[in-house]
Amino acid sequence: MVWKKILRRLSAMLATLLVAGLLAATLVRFAPGFDADERELDPHLNRESVQALHQSRLSEHNILAFYSNYLRNAVHGELGRSRSLDQPVLSLLRDRWPVTARLVAIGLFLAWTLALGLAISGALIRWSPYDVLGTSVSGIALCIPAAVLALLSVLLRIPGEAVVACIVFPKVYRYTRNLIGKTYSQPHITSARSRGLSEMRILLWHVFPIIGPQMAALAGISVGIAVGATVAVESLLGLPGLGQLAWQAALARDLPLLINLTLVITLVTLLANSSGDLIAEMFRSSEA
Amino acid sequence: MSSVRRLALAILLAVGGLSLAADWLSPASYRTQFREAPNSPPSRQHLLGTDAMGRDRFSRLLYGTRISLTLAPAAAAVSTVLGILLGGLTGYLGGAWARLGMATTDLFLSLPWLFLLITVRALLPLNVSPLTSVLITFLILGLLGWAASARVLCAASQSLRKSSFVLQARASGLHGVRLFLVHVLPNLKPVLLAQFWISIPVFILSEANLGILGLGVTEPLPSWGSLLRELEGLLSFHQEPWKLAPLILLMIVVTSFQLVLSKEETAA
């Protein structure tokens, strides 16, 4: 049963990824300047060489042919060459993913620790000024653009991981707080309290099993939020990760690099979302 | 209406009114350079000082607020209309249409928002006139930001589709687009308005992010994004607090937009 669900999720993910790739290829094909190649302006090239360059791009005019060719190469580990950095895309991705992975992992750990700590302690303490404080801090963080947080972190000498945590924290905290609040207002919790169960026992035995599935799904979504935040954080803090690469590719209109980055990021977020959903489903089925 | 919502609405009206009166209130045009006084601190002539190019910061803030506050709602309107078409209509049609609509929505929602924005922005020319850059920026926000609204509208129209009054209208011979326009769409209005209102602060923040990353509105036109880029050169909060004015205004406006909606509307 579980394998069936995993297989279904994986096939849905693959289909989404293929459609996303086709959409990206279509956008790239119709982007202004698709036909232009700076190498054709090189005065050292003769007419035949320029003609050969032009001919090599003619095969890319048909979107389906362009996309199937891209997929065929991708299967063999050939993701093309970055026009702006003049390096193979695969080696660029290989060099830079550890920086992003570290940033996202530590940022998520900090955000979740802070959000869960505040939400759970708020529910246990049940003191309204504490709740107001948490809500206000998260509200303020929600109103500041991610790029501004990154800029201010330079001034305040805060590491990038903390900035990613500041971007993810308010969303996780607000959702968790509301979820815990709703669960605590259920009649079986009141009944458990009236029977004299300790707050910790209520939390572990009666609250966590209920909020578990939704928290698992939120964990998946939070990966996407953290990955999205890396664009601003890495670009403005000068961290050589995938986010900075995407920004550089966007500024240089390096479309081959950008399409590959988009697909990699889509794959990561889809994997995270699907894993979160799958864990949530497993939680629910074990509860049932 | 609660007092907090009234206050938030009053703030939005005041900020909107001030930005619309920028032609009369600002001491100079947003592009007039006072070359003899670049980077000057606040004075009677320049309330928020001047930027590195000697332009009056207060004037630029007023004009930038006008651009952001006019075009973010326009982008929200575009995304809400797309949300109706791709979520509301497909949810109403049901079956394969609803599945296709939701699959497209899931595809858009699975992409990190900022990645999607910079990718699509990069596909379009970057060296464009300032006015074109404004239109491109906000049009992209409107055209790409429909997914969350579509999901909510799809769920709302699917539940309306099964409601008794729609079944009764169908039994009376009303079908297709006419049934959608006459009975379903008017009942989607509260959800539509909530989605429209929720999208505005999201687009304001997105434009600010794009502007700071150099992919938003281009100089000399000001927007909150381009004004916030100045924070890159901020020495310290104590030495130049006036440089934080665009950020403080943006935070006030975004908070006000969020406070205007009631909890029920936000949940919708």
Image (cartoon, coloured by chain):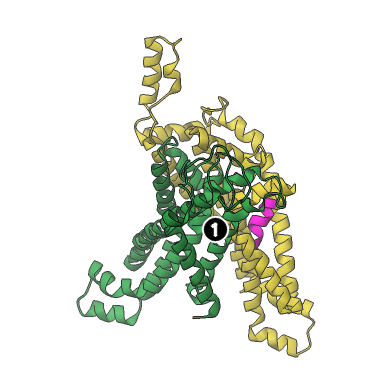
Chain colours: A yellow, B green
Q: Amino acid at mark 1?
A: Lys
Along the line of sight, the residue nearer the viewer: A21 or B250: B250
The picture places residue B191, in percent across and down from the top left corner, at: 41, 71
Q: Quadrant of residue A195?
A: bottom right
Residue B88, above or below A256: below
Q: Residue furthest front?
A: B44
Task: Please give the chain letter of the residue carrying mark 1.
Answer: A
Which residue corresponds to the image point at 74% horizontal and 61% vertical from the top-left? A113
Residue at 61% over, 39% down:
A244
**In x, y percent, where is residue A223?**
62, 53
Foreground residue among A155 and B176: A155
Label 1: element kind:
helix
Q: In x, y percent, where is residue A7?
A: 54, 54
| Residue bearing mark 1 | A4
Helix, strand or loop: magenta stretch: helix
- Residue B107 among magenta residues: no
Does residue A204 lie above or below B87 as drawn? below
- Name the residue at the left extreme: B173
Q: Position of residue A173 (x, y in %)?
A: 66, 65
Magenta segment range? A163-170
Q: Is residue B165 left or right of residue B34?
A: left
**Nearest the camera: B69 or A231?**
B69
Instruction: Say which quarter of the image contains residue A220.
Output: bottom right
- Look at 52% across and 36% down and name the residue there: A251
B153 sits left or right of A85 in the view: left
Taking the magenta stretch, the answer to whether it contains residue A169 is yes
